[in-house]
Image (spheres, rainbow, N blue to C red):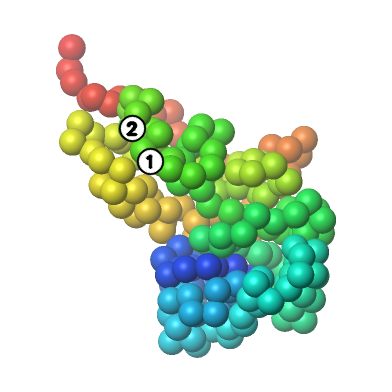
Amino acid sequence: MGRLKTAILISGRGSNMQALIDYCSTTDAAAEIKLVLSNVPDAVGLRRASEAGVSTEVINHKLYPDRETFENLLTKTLKSHKIELVCLAGFMRLLTGSFVNCWRDKLINIHPSLLPAFKGINTHKRALEAGVRFSGCTVHFVRTKMDSGPIIMQAAVPILPDDNPDILAARVLAAEHRCYPHALSLIARGKTQVVNEKVLIEGNEIVDTVLFNPNEKI
């Protein structure tokens, strides 16, 4: 069985892209990054991907009259590279239902919150304002509604008293860089199955752990 042919869609610096590339560069990785595609011609992530020896493409959405034309070219390009899974990593374009359904259960995203909490933007600021004790990130299969879809994996981090949005964002991003490759590995090794819009993980060990924040003895 060959490695899962994976593409990454980016619009910016590509830090999560780099984490996925680093994972796939290991000898026992079950996935390979065949393509990094950006809608922004000067995205920093394109240079980083090229330096890692990954093929890159640019499809500038501004050159096309509508989303349908743009997305049709996206799909044509992905299929020309025989892509089996698409990872969104800071891809700053809302995708239409037509594209999402075309790649159903073959399109994943990472979001910097513990979904379904804090969908959309300004997640860290909103988490701090809400006074929650934990934040984190979520990898999920993409559906037509924004930041929705079957959850593959989540990672939680504590929110500390002196946090501001930037400090919290850095802590969550470090978790993202561990969580996204792990989720990709699960899919590539055939460990995931979507049943009734929930993801079942083969061989998932139940960890009976309770996290407290604050963690004071009583």
Is residue 193 depicted above or below 26 in this figure? Answer: above
Dot 1 crowding, Cα within 10 Å, few <14, some 14–19, many 20+: many
Instruction: Name which residue lies at 69% across and 76% down.
Output: 63
Residue topped by disc 1: 124
Dot 2 crowding, Cα within 10 Å, few <14, some 14–19, many 20+: some
- Type of residue at label 2? Leu
* Quadrant of the drawing holding the N terminus: bottom right
Q: Nearer the viewer, residue 194 or 157?
A: 157
- The reply to whether the C-beta atoms of the residues labelled 2 and 1 are less than 8 Å apart is yes
Q: Position of residue 59 (x, y in %)?
A: 65, 77
Q: Quadrant of residue 135?
A: top left
Instruction: Name which residue lies at 66% across and 64% down.
Output: 86
Q: Nearer the viewer, residue 105 or 101?
A: 101
Q: Position of residue 55 (x, y in %)?
A: 58, 85
Q: Nearer the viewer, residue 68 or 47?
A: 68
Q: Position of residue 61 (x, y in %)?
A: 66, 71
Left or right of 24, for residue 99: right
Is residue 15 depicted above or below 58 in this figure? Answer: above
Left or right of 3, for residue 97: right
Is residue 125 depicted above or below 83 in this figure? Answer: above
Q: CA distance from mark 2 to mark 1?
A: 6 Å
- All told, the count of numbered labels is 2
Instruction: Name which residue lies at 76% across and 65% down.
Output: 66
Q: Secondary structure at mark 2?
A: helix
Q: Residue furthest front?
A: 65
- Type of residue at label 1? His
Residue topped by disc 2: 128
Left or right of 43, for residue 103: right
Q: Residue furthest top?
A: 218
